Image (tube, rainbow, N blue to C red):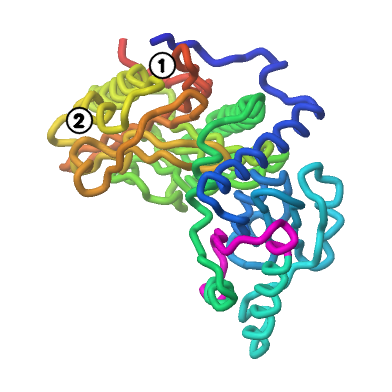
Amino acid sequence: MSLSGPNRNPADCEPTYDEIQQIQLDRLQRVRNELKKRDYAACVLFDPTHMRYATGSRNMQVYSARNPARYAFIPAEGPVVIFEFGGCLHLAESLNTVNEVRPAKAISYYFCDSFLNNVTADWAAEIDELVRQCGGGKRIAIESATSAAAFELQRLGYQVFDAQEPLERARCIKVPNELKMIRASLRATETGVRLMESKLVPGISENELWSHLHQHVIATDGDYVETRLLSSGPRTNPWFQECSTRPIEAGDLVALDTDVVGRFGYYADFSRTFLCGDQAATAKQQELYKLAYEQVQTNVEMLKAGRSFKEYAEMAWKIPEHYKNNRYFALAHGVGMTGEYPYVVHREDIDALGYDDVFEAGMTICVESYIGHDDGGEGVKLEEQIYIHEHGIELLSDYPFDPRLLPR
């Protein structure tokens, strides 16, 4: 297995206009191919991440995630139609993946009140008309819609399936030059984390420190930070304590997970743990960091195309007994525009939570570690983002480890 370091060539970290146009077409084709594999006539996508993947459309991503007010009709064969939020149709008109833009029917009580049933029936009738125009078929996939939408399609004679499956399978293998978008998002986020780390001084609150990353994400044309995973001192154990008003103290560990939906809509997902102040790390802090570092490095090196998830879990670095209860929920997971397929669990969790498949060339994977003792104290979070190719793996994330904590 060959491990190459991060690619810092500017030409490989920024797609050209023509490359962006082709990436959009290639992603759309991957979606169509997955629909054809399942004999689906079409899918209707409400999830704004899926819409952006399939068409390149970007509009009110966070708002759209909770309001079914815009959606895309993607047939296995035939014209792609985006249904945009009122007053926003112009945003999708220039997309090379989209044949027509129509006003959306917002199938939500919030928008419709007592007219919801009628609006939903009209929505389903319009989708039915589009399917017929594309050759017909009674197998259709939708996601993130209201239950009433699915019921109305069933009333019209459709078998309704979950569109997440074909979309996850489409997204998990990256198309040519998609890595340029991923690297662009990572490079911007890494600069944001450097800015944030430079602001780490005793007395700053977790929230204020975290805000510097948010500002940089917006300034570099990213979308948002998906979580609030920055904590300090005793709040680093257990993990998943959202950032707070707590003032960070000298000598505290500060752990973070970026979870940035950044440039081009791609997830920049790596984790680091810093030491606040100018003093040396304690022996305990170095021990925690050493374990987390060993776990990440060992598990990164075991990634390769063709290896099964269960084989990977069995081969993975063994967590010491007193750290097992607080282990991170996954060994590794796919990553693209967000966290995505696959999701690989620890050997202890395979029977209850695991599924099996194989890592494939073209996947981008995040390798996780969290080390926090059962008895409390501080914890360390580390994570790297990796690309798997036919001849080995490439480290995508490019952020240094804290030298005061790093094993020597």
Asked if the stretch drawn in magenta spans residue 351, the answer is: no
Q: Can you name the residue that lies furthest to the left here?
A: 321
- Which segment is the magenta one? 130-148
Q: Quadrant of residue 298?
A: top left
Q: Secondary structure at mark 1?
A: loop
Q: Position of residue 324 (x, y in %)?
A: 18, 38
Q: Position of residue 21 (x, y in %)?
A: 78, 34
Label 2 CA crowd tier, 10 Å (few <14, some 14–19, many 20+): some
| Res 191 seen here | no
Q: Which residue is mark 1?
A: 403
Q: Which residue is mark 2?
A: 319
Q: Residue at x 42, y 51 (%)?
A: 242
Q: Check disc 2 and give the amino acid type.
A: Ile
Marks 1/2: CA–CA distance: 23 Å
Q: Secondary structure at mark 2?
A: loop
Q: Position of residue 180 (x, y in %)?
A: 66, 25
Seen from the viewer's position, the closer of residues 384 and 342 is: 342
Q: Can you name the residue that lies furthest to the bottom here?
A: 114
- Indicate the quadrant containing the N terminus: top left, top right, bottom left or bottom right: top left
**Mark 1–mark 2 CB contact (< 8 Å):** no
- Report the side of 101 relative to 124 (left or right): right
Relative height, residue 159 to residue 340 (above, below): below
